[in-house]
Image: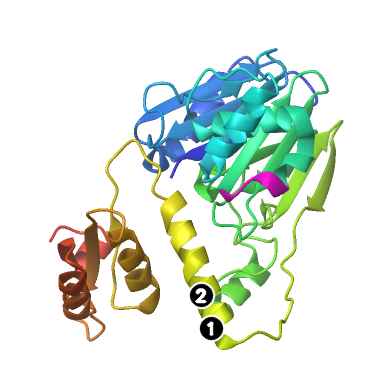
Amino acid sequence: MSGICGIIHLDPLPINSSIIINRMNEKLRHRGPDEKGIFAEKNVALGFRRLSIIDLEGGRQPLKDEAGRYRLVFNGTIYNSLKLREELLSRGHQFRTACDAEVVLHLFEEMGAGCLPYLRGMFAFAIWDRLKKRLFLARDRFGIKPLYYLPQKKGLVFASELKAFQAFPGFQSKLNEESFQHYLTFQYVPGNDTILKNVYRLPPAHYLIWQDNKTTLEQYWELTICPQEKPLTFFIEGIQERLQDAVSIHRRSDVERGAFLSSGVDSSCVVALLRRMEEVKTYSVGCAGGKYNELPQAAQTASFLDTQHRDTKVSSSLFLGEAA
């Protein structure tokens, strides 16, 4: 998990734009405690908070392309980045890092918005085109990584979390009453609105372009259902093959990894498939004093799969941030 934020404006930003973007960045510190970075010039300021997973030393952001035309801030993981990297190298691209974010930058340099269908992963990123004075925002197909934006009279502000907007001068944190009603009904806010007035969510599988103070929102992918008349074994084997492939490509990391484990089918299945490939550290969280506690079942699953298992209980006082 990392965090990104940025400010774009038609007119030159004030000389303290670096201070503003740093303050926004600090609001995202919990998303990326390992490192921070900013880029600021005449009409733009970009911020990044990093949780280091791949290329711990070289993967600093914001990133720039070979010619210095683009600047990128990226949150997420591209699981097919190694394959894409090989293809880009064969076409003459030069890489400064081993991180997957740079793959996105070079692919965008070559294909623009057309790069998105090639990205297999979870992501939210922003690219500033210094030549065309154009901002490009994009979000993964299922909206795993968050991205919000705040339109301005002559610009736009974006961030990974709503709290970052609190550091933007003049921002008024006003409740969106209609969204609040939806939240009370559904326990979430549907659509592109958020709980705050005038702040919007970039929808999954969409990209946004800001240029000359005009904003364009486009969808680049849509889920399609294609029923097939096949025997049951075809679907069972197909699902197993795809799950195995998904778990395998999620393993890329330059730091230690583990897996959350509940008593549910989904996490148990993922851990079982991962256990075929390597030793696994599993973690479970339960509720102290409540009737909904899956720790015994999770421990039983961990024992059956022979994982290095740890669990903990969360009390109401710890959940609320009070002293235990």
Q: Is residue 243 left or right of residue 83?
A: left
Using the rendered view, name the quadrant where residue 303 is placed: bottom left
Q: Position of residue 149 (x, y in %)?
A: 67, 46
Using the rendered view, name the quadrant where residue 131 is placed: top right
Q: Which residues are magenta?
A: 117-121
Q: Position of residue 239 (x, y in %)?
A: 52, 72
Using the rendered view, name the quadrant where residue 276 is placed: bottom left
> Relative to residue 227, is residue 179 depicted above or below?
above
Say what secondary structure mark 1 lies in. helix
Q: Which residue is mark 2?
A: 237
Asked whether 247 or 290 is in front, the reply is 247
Q: Position of residue 191 (x, y in %)?
A: 69, 66
Please rate how many residues cluster around mark 1, counting C-alpha atoms within 10 Å: few if below 14, some from 14 to 19, many from 20.
few
Please rate how many residues cluster around mark 2, counting C-alpha atoms within 10 Å: few if below 14, some from 14 to 19, many from 20.
few
Q: Total label count?
A: 2
- Residue 7 seen in render: no
Q: Is residue 38 left or right of residue 312?
A: right
* Quadrant of the image containing the N terminus: top left
Q: Residue at x 28, y 61 (%)?
A: 275
Say what secondary structure mark 2 lies in. helix
Callout 1 touching callout 2 (CB < 8 Å) = yes
- Residue 269 seen in render: yes
Say what amino acid the circle numbered 2 marks: Glu
Q: Residue at x 61, y 39 (%)?
A: 125
Mark 1 and mark 2: span between their CA atoms? 6 Å
Q: Give residue 103's mark.
A: none
Q: Which residue is mark 1?
A: 233
* Quadrant of the image containing the C terminus: bottom left
